[in-house]
């Protein structure tokens, strides 16, 4: 068994110190998803299928919000590492303006497509009204979702992982409370689930922004800085955000395509697919926390001009992500029946969901590798090639295999294709990590 040097031990401790708050936020988010799914699932397979029909499109729109924030937060990590604190505050201010503009534009577009969307996704006509209403309410909260992500990622990249971790946990608590009020208190069903999520998003985004803008030792607006756009900041943001937006679009459009493929299989299959995705989220919560830490540590190390340290952090984070996800994957395999008993009252949905989820958990270690590697690459400002890799993986492997297998295997074929694709993606991301060329990406900031 290899012995860790003192330097490696220190690096592991720092990764854990930054990862734990993010992992706790992911855990709370997953708990929120489970409670949401259980609350809606108690209304029957129809309600679950209505939300599941449009959920992949909400991921697509939400991913675009994240991309705008990423364009500025990665710069902040590198500027903090270089001790250029005033420039970091200027990047924060420019990011705030950009996210609010992007959020407003996305809100208008999403509201406009809310009515025809369930039809375009080939859902059952009985799901149209609830699915459209859910997506419309979700759309109204998009400017606040953009603001929350921007503020939270800025705090994280400045080195404060604790505050966004706590506030994202509170987001889950608020969501549960608002859901109880709107779903059951007012008897609004699926519409109540959307209102609960939107209301919690509004509340926590404002608090998150307050902490970033007025309480942060690094970012506080009281410490000075300019609201004017600068050429170097905008150019670097575009260089990071456009490929990131492309990547999110590629990934989420593939999820939408998977929903399109699964929708004709019927309400039970659509509900099982949606709940299996929710149940699977238990597996990857550590990887996203460690990936967030990798973005911060790699960005700050490269900002300080230390490529060797950035590479070391990336390798440590990738190994930790794979180990953690191997453990959570094993737990999910054995706990799958219990998970579905908590999520739905439908015996048919439980049986099918448990079966397909157990297919996919074998890919979790390599899926974890791809998540953490992407976080490390993001910290270096390397978003273009990873987005192309995701394009090839999702559309060349997952969607192609899904189309081939769905005719004979149904939902089992779609999840078999998912397992194969996640393994493929993990391998190609690890190869890029080991080659180290991503360390040569230069941001002019």
Image (cartoon, rainbow, N blue to C red):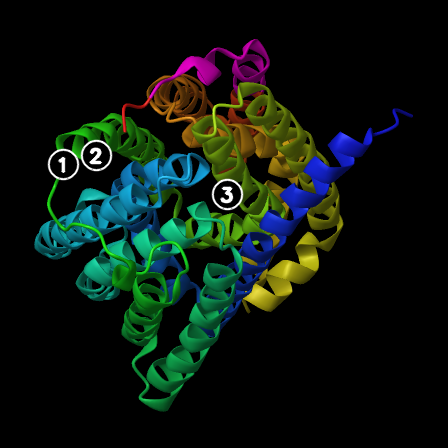
Q: Secondary structure at mark 3?
A: helix
Q: Main secondary structure of the magenta part?
A: helix
**According to the image, label 1 marks what residue?**
230
Foreground of the two, 353 or 96: 96
> Quick one: 327 or 80, which is closer to the camera?
80
Judging from the image, what secondary structure is the residue with disc 1 in?
loop
Which residue matches tag 2?
A: 233
Name the residue beneath numbered marker 3: 292
Looking at the image, which residue is at 74% across and 49% down?
A: 331
Q: Quadrant of the C terminus?
A: top left
* Residue located at (31% from left, 44% from top): 88
| Residue nearer the viewer, 404 or 256 | 256
The N terminus: image quadrant: top right
Give me the C-alpha separation between circle 2 and circle 3.
Answer: 22 Å
Apparent side of residue 111 relative to residue 211 in the rendered image (left or right): left
Q: Nearer the viewer, residue 307 or 33?
A: 307
Tell me the magenta residue range: 427-442
Can residue 90 be seen here? The reply is yes
Give the quadrant of residue 327: top right
In front of the other: label 2 or label 3?
2
Quick one: label 3, few (<14), some, or many (20+) residues within 10 Å? many
Residue 257 occupies quadrant: top left
Q: Residue at 18% of width from left, 64% of height from top?
A: 140
């Amino acid at each position: 068994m290899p012995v860790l040097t003192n330097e490696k031990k220190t690096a592991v401790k720092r990764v854990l110190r930054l990862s734990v708050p993010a992992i706790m936020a992911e855990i709370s988010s997953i708990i929120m998803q489970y409670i949401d799914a259980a609350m809606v699932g108690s209304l029957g397979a129809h309600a679950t299928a209505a939300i599941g029909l449009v959920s992949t499109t909400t991921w697509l729109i939400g991913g675009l919000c994240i991309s705008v924030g990423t364009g500025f937060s990665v710069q902040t990590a590198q500027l903090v590492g270089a001790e250029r604190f005033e420039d970091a505050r200027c990047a924060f201010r420019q990011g705030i303006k950009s996210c609010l503009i992007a959020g407003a534009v996305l809100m208008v577009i999403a509201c406009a497509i809310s009515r025809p969307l369930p039809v375009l996704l080939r859902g059952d006509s009985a799901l149209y009204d609830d699915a459209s209403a859910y997506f419309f309410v979700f759309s109204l909260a998009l400017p606040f979702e953009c603001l929350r992500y921007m503020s939270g990622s800025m705090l994280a990249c400045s080195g404060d992982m604790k505050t966004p971790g706590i506030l994202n946990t509170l987001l889950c608590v608020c969501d549960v409370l608002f859901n109880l009020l709107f779903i059951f208190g007012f008897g609004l069903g699926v519409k109540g689930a959307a209102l609960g999520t939107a209301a919690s998003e509004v509340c926590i985004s404002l608090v998150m922004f307050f902490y970033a803008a007025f309480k942060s030792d690094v970012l506080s607006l009281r410490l000075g800085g300019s609201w004017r756009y600068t050429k170097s900041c905008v150019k670097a943001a575009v260089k990071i955000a456009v490929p990131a937006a492309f990547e999110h679009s590629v990934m989420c459009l593939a999820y939408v395509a998977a929903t399109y493929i699964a929708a004709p299989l019927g309400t039970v299959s659509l509900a099982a697919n949606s709940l299996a995705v929710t149940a699977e989220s238990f597996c990857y919560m550590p990887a996203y926390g460690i990936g967030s830490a990798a973005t911060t540590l790699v960005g700050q190390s490269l900002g300080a001009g230390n490529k060797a340290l950035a590479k070391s952090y990336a390798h440590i984070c990738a190994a930790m992500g794979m180990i953690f996800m191997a453990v959570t994957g094993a737990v999910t395999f054995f706990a799958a029946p219990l998970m579905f008993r908590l999520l739905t009252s439908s015996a048919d949905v439980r049986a099918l969901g448990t079966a397909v989820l157990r297919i996919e958990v074998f890919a979790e270690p390599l899926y974890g590798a791809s998540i953490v590697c992407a976080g490390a690459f993001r910290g270096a400002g390397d978003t273009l090639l990873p987005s192309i890799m995701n394009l090839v993986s999702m559309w060349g492997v997952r969607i192609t295999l899904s189309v081939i297998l769905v005719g004979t295997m149904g939902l089992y074929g779609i999840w078999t294709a998912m397992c194969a694709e996640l393994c493929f993606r993990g391998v190609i991301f690890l190869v890029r990590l080991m080659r180290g060329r991503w360390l040569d990406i230069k941001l002019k900031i």
